[in-house]
Image (spheres, helix red, strand yellow):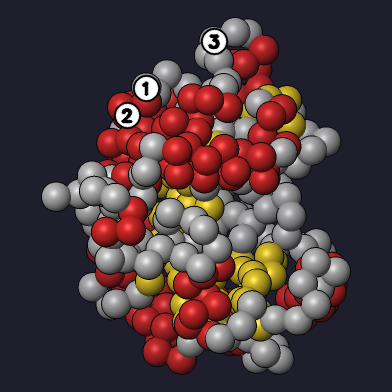
Amino acid sequence: MKQKDNPFVLSDDNKRYQTYNYYLRNRFGQKVFKVPLNVDLGCPNRDGTKGVGGCIFCSAKLSGDFAGNPCDDIQSQFAEIKEKMHKKWIEGLYIPYFQAGSNTYADEKTLREMYYTALGFENVVGLSIATRADCITEEIADLLSEIAERTYLTVELGLQSIHDETAELCNRCHTYADFVRGFEMLKKRGINVCVHIINGLPFETKDMMIETARVVGELGIHSIKIHLLHILRGTRLALMYENNEFKAMTLEDYVDTVVEQLKVLPKEVIIQRVTGDGAKDELIAPLWSLKKFCVMNEIDKKMARENIYQGMNIV
């Protein structure tokens, strides 16, 4: 099937998959960008509730390396990060993004206050909340449903892999079945869910990574973030890497894997990321990931060269 015969318009910037930027511009009529925040709610995988030490790949900042300073209040963080981002984009609308840690890991009163505080900032058109599926309860899901009726809400659930042996190795302290239970609480309330997956986790094969994308795509998700495994200083993953227990993905392998994943993701799924950022000062490997736009360009070139587009392998 030729690209010109594909009735789905994937983007307006020559991408062969539906980008988040494209979706937001079409929904809101102009540039929209997320402003990452850190409210330091912690994680049940660090405080002993579910486990200790966190996931083997997680940084000390709970994957919030680019978020605000948790010592500052939400309003101060929002103002500071927003101004930094305006150096790249002159104007736009905002989505406060509770990024670091598990941002549903608190009582309903605390969560309600912080969500509604962020929604009150000027020119805010939505809210993104990153968390773990095992930090979703019926009470919290009801609160999120209330928020979703007022604004464009996306709840971002870290899954990383559908394979329980990988989850156990990574010290996730939950199973795929646990993930599905939390996801279903949100889905039955009509809440947009973005799922995070990671390519390059120790001992996973390319087929396993593609299977993760395929299965997640069949859940009826709103969007997905495809990440590359970053090996960061100070993590247990770094010790494994230094002991030669596994190898980091090559650029070629990563590009091939992402392209195959895009082929099995439904065309209506928004692709929020096809790679990610690792803190430059903490990154051990793979160093090629520092050139994020080069990675994205390699994905685009392969898809164009081989006439590949999102969802093409779905019958």
Q: Please name which of the two marks, 3 or 2, marks the residue nearer to the observer.
A: 2
Q: Residue at x 66, y 26 (%)?
A: 286
Which quarter of the figure has residue 78?
Answer: bottom right
Q: Residue at x 49, y 61 (%)?
A: 19
Label 1 neighbour load within 10 Å: few <14, some 14-19, many 20+: few
Marks 3/2: CA–CA distance: 19 Å
Question: In the figure, 243 relative to 308: above or below?
Answer: above
Label 3 neighbour load within 10 Å: few <14, some 14-19, many 20+: few
Q: Which amino acid does label 1 sit on?
A: Thr
First in residue order: circle 3 vs circle 1: 1
Residue 241 locus on image (x, y percent)? 62, 16
The residue beneath circle 3 is 245
Report the front residue among 167 and 273: 273
Labelled disc at residue 205: 1
Residue 105 visible, this orientation:
no
Asked if marks 1 and 2 touch (Cβ < 8 Å), the reply is yes
Q: Which amino acid does label 3 sit on?
A: Glu
Label 2 neighbour load within 10 Å: few <14, some 14-19, many 20+: some
Residue 214 visible, this orientation:
yes
Q: Which residue is drawn at 53% across and 14% down?
A: 246
Q: Which amino acid does label 2 sit on?
A: Met
The residue beneath circle 2 is 208
